[in-house]
Amino acid sequence: MSRMEASATSDETLIKRYAAGDVTSFQELYDRYESQLWKFVLRQSGNRAMAEELTQDVWFTVTREAPRFNDTGRFGPWLFTIARNRIIDNFRTTQRHENLDATDEPAAPAIDSPPAQTERLQTGQAILRALSSLPTDQREAFVLQADAGLSVSEIATVTGTNLETAKSRLRYARDKLRESLKAYL
Amino acid sequence: MTNDAEQELVDQYRIVSAEDAGPAPAAVRKAVLAEAAAAARRRQPAANDGKYLWRAVASIGVMAIALLIWRESEPELSRAPAGELRTVKAARDTTNAAPAAQTSAPSAQIEHRSRPSQRQEKKAEAMPPPMPTSPSLSRSVQVAEAGAPSPARPPQDAERVDAVVQDAAAGAVAAGAAEATTSVTAAAPAKAAKQPQSDVAASAGRSTQRLTPAQLYQLHFPDSNDANTETSIAWLLMNNAGEVLEKGRLLPSDSLETLRIRLIDRHRVAISAWQSMAGYDQQGRPLRIAIARTNQ
């Protein structure tokens, strides 16, 4: 299969082709989701070295589990579900998992006064800091939407919640970010 | 905050996130793609792997060649039809014309292998002949008991084995004679048991009825005192009525089967396979007689 053909093919078809032995299909899938998955894992782990390891593990899992990919499901949510489970396992192992499944909303810490550098850089750092201060499930929902491009229903699927919970987490996350970034936006 | 403001927040975040995260590490990409290729290879059935395919083809080729070699080296006898095989064996056994006691063991082994009813025959020999179950069985039993009354008689196995060779008469050509034999033995099994005579002689007709091989030999080859009974086989060609149409001696270098074909050509009639008998003449020398019958 040529790259051009692959680019016009759905994710689900590509993963099935890969399961049947077509490595080119996997490369196409990897190119499509490489950046999204990397950003999601990096934001959730908060550690670049750890994010590299986790990202690699997630893709390895995809290569192993490809033959068991559900025909009726979509590849994106399936991939991010694997990633989320891997991150949770990692946090549980390293005792760094902080209230991942909690639904209570801890108060967001106030953003420090902007540093005396360029406005853009200041804004960028402020956004990332505000994001990292969000509760894990809210941050997760926000990153899945903003970085991975998942819909609300897909976010609900990945996080194992219902649609309303996913919506409320997104709303809380935006409200807190807006509140924290008042000075920049 | 309005929807526009929210969208602006998300857009700004995306820009910042992309700048901060950068591309995924190249090392991760390399490792993942290598693992993907390896996993795909592991899932491939061995049959699709060229290496295994060639091995399979080579193995099949070797087996085919071995089979061909085996078939080529197979003895000629084992390829012959069953009836023909027995006839050829009988001819070979008799043509060798070795002393009965010496040749009986190998021929016994051959017959044992080629005849599934051998066990039944042994059982029949061990006890007085009951109701014969088949013409060949009754013949074998009777012939085994029709040994020459010589004091220097070798073990009975020799005669039994030679008598078993008579089953070569089971060919279609011998249908008439075989039926005659069957009727004799099946109609009066008790009599056959009491009077152990050669059924070959009985079925051959009145002139040879109840004659042992030695008596048959004496009757038809009275001037054979000088003949070498150990190395040549006496043969008789009889008709359905038991009359001797032709007789003679077979040289060791000749084959009974060749002789039979010659006789068929000469008499223009169907001739049964040879029935071979062994015994001892009055001087105690081993002798062999082969009898074939026409169907007329």
Image: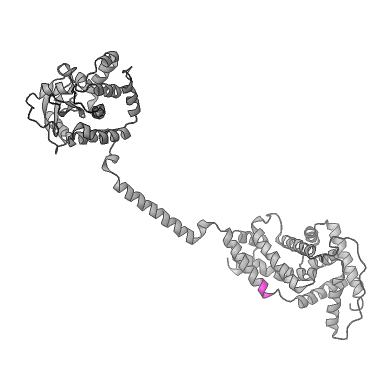
Instruction: Give above or below for B71 relative to B1.
Output: above
On the image, the x and y values in percent for residue B236 come to 14, 26
Residue at screen point 12% across, 28% down:
B267
Q: Can residue B44 be seen in this view?
A: yes
Q: Is residue B251 left or right of residue B173?
A: left
Q: Is residue A168 left or right of residue A43?
A: right
Residue at (26%, 34%) from the top-left corner? B105
* Quadrant showing the N terminus of chain B: bottom right
Q: Quadrant of residue B45?
A: bottom right
Foreground residue among B136 and A34? B136
Quarter of the image for residue B281 reads top left
Magenta segment includes B296: no
Q: Does the magenta stretch include residue B25?
A: yes
* Residue A155 vertical position relative to residue B216 in the rendered view, above or below: below
Residue B264 drawn at (x, y percent): 15, 31
Residue A7 position in % (x across, y down): 64, 67
Residue at 78%, 72% (x, y): give it: A47
Instruction: Tell me where residue B285 sits by quadrant.
Output: top left
Query: Can residue B164 be seen in this snapshot?
Result: no
Name the outermost residue toward the front: B151
- Nearest the viewer among B134 and B194 is B194
x then y, percent, for residue B265: 13, 32
The residues colored magenta run B22-28
Task: State the residue in front, A101 or B289.
Answer: B289
Left or right position of A51 against B113: right
Quadrant where the image shows the C terminus of chain B: top left
